Amino acid sequence: MLKYTFDWSIVTSGKYFEWLVSGLKVTLELSAVGIVCAFILGLLIAVLKMSHYRPVRWIATAYLEFFRNTPLLVQIFFWYFGSYKVLPAAVNEWLNSTNFEFAAAAIALTIYTSAFIAEDIRSGILSIPKEQMEAARSAGFSYLRSMQYIILPQAVRITIPPLVNQFLNLAKNSSLAMSIGVMELTYQARQVESYTFKGFEAFTAATVVYLGLSVVITALMDLYNKKVLNPNRA
Amino acid sequence: MIKFEGVHKWFKKLHVLNGIDLHVKQGEVVVVCGPSGSGKSTLIRTINQLEPIEEGSLIVDGMDLRSKKTDLNKLRAEVGFVFQQFNLYPHLSVIDNITLAPIKIRKTSKKEAQEQAMELLERVGLAVKRDAYPTQLSGGQQQRVAIARALAMKPRIMLFDEPTSALDPEMIGEVLAVMQDLASTGMTMVCVTHEMGFAREVSDRVVFMDHGVILEEAQPEEFFRNPQHDRAKQFLKQLLSPMH
């Protein structure tokens, strides 16, 4: 006999519903900051990794291998528990006056994901025929301007499907931020469970919300692919 | 305008340019021909430093290409280059392909760049294609846009690297007509091509290359009527009657 009685009302209205909503808000903020920053940083690392200068390539390679080959949770702990120990007292004071949990989680998510994004963008760049770079250089564009106007716009388009994967991973990985006390969606679902013992309802609600978030990200990227990037372009 | 003196270039151990001496004067149209692997494409690609040279001296439009002080981006802005495979930017429309470099490099206003682009498109007969994308155009149309794109920078020299070799036979004429029109305006041109009709009617001089060496340099009538070198004779014979 099933002894458990379901009570879905706790996650659809009232105090606990509000907790989940506030958690979703933090998850959305963390994901949005992470996606934008990780994309920009990933783009930069991808270009650095293809530089003509060997030391620059080495730095980019070290960055990539370091951050994609260590667990995200360890990186979150490092930024939260480790980084401030080596900073001056004044900086620490300022950090404590801010939302340092959120910042540490955002930094970890950004850096971790940027390493994967950089590799995706780099493979996109490598798939563009080298004649495109020659055409751009022949017109008088510098290497970086050629990248900016001719190579990257084509490479990013090719990179969209793997980029969607990275964005989805980032949004879902943001749940690890609960481990340092960021009051995001998973944290709040856990709180609801602690107060009500309704773990099934609380985590079902969290699951549905994460699923919805992923669907929205996928749909937005799809729209970008179809509408913003003209379908006639190769 | 372009002066090669004792130019050498190697690809690893392959000696692709072996002591090139060549002088192209302003307003001259020079056709470079020769069998495949003769180094003619490499030769033309050294003029805008898509290929660096290892030895000798090369002066283009007063700029010494061996000097570290020469700004290659500035040189390339003055030298238009047309590729065998067109290499239009596939993510940009025809008009944007043409106006990108003038707007970003010459700092021309968008309005002015577009007016100039339309004039060029009229000239190559493709004004109606201004908003098309490269993949929607035939090879001949793409190459004409590529020529317009190069001309939009108002170059002092135009280089053509086998501009008709990737085209279906019925499209070769339309591209050659544009090139002929350009030659009549006094543009300095160097063309790598197998189109001997173009060489005969339009060029001022024909340069024949093999194995990285210039074997023969002559006025077109002279070159076609009375080639001096055995390799040139053989080359012309094969080109004019490929069945033998």
Image (tube, coloured by chain):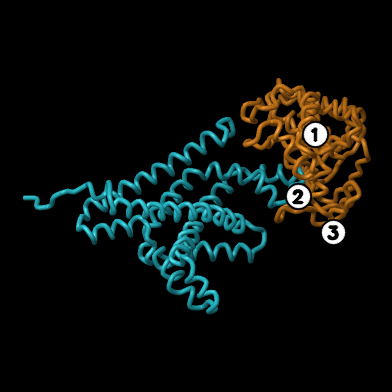
Query: What is the C-alpha distance between the residues marked 2 and 1?
Result: 33 Å
The residue singled out by tag 1 in the image is B112
Q: Position of residue B17 (x, y in %)?
A: 80, 49
Chain of the residue under label 1? B
Q: Which residue is mark 2?
A: B51
Which is nearer the eye, B48 or B127? Answer: B127
* Residue B69 marker: 3
Q: Are marks 1 and 3 in contact (CB under 8 Å)?
A: no
Q: Colour of chain A?
A: cyan
Q: Nearer the viewer, residue B55 or A157?
A: A157
Nearer to us of marks 2 and 3 is 3
Which three-letter amino acid code belongs to the residue tagged 3? Answer: Lys
- State the residue at coordinates (53%, 76%): A87
Query: Which sits in the foreground, B124 or B28?
Result: B124
Query: Amino acid under label 1?
Result: Glu
Q: Are marks 2 and 3 in contact (CB under 8 Å)?
A: no
- A17 displayed left or right of A100: left
Q: Residues within 10 Å of mark 1 (few under 14, many from 20)?
A: few
**Which numbered disc, 2 or 1, marks the residue that appears first in the sequence?**
2
What shade does chain B have?
Answer: orange
A91 relative to B15 in the view: left or right: left
Looking at the image, can residue B40 be seen? yes
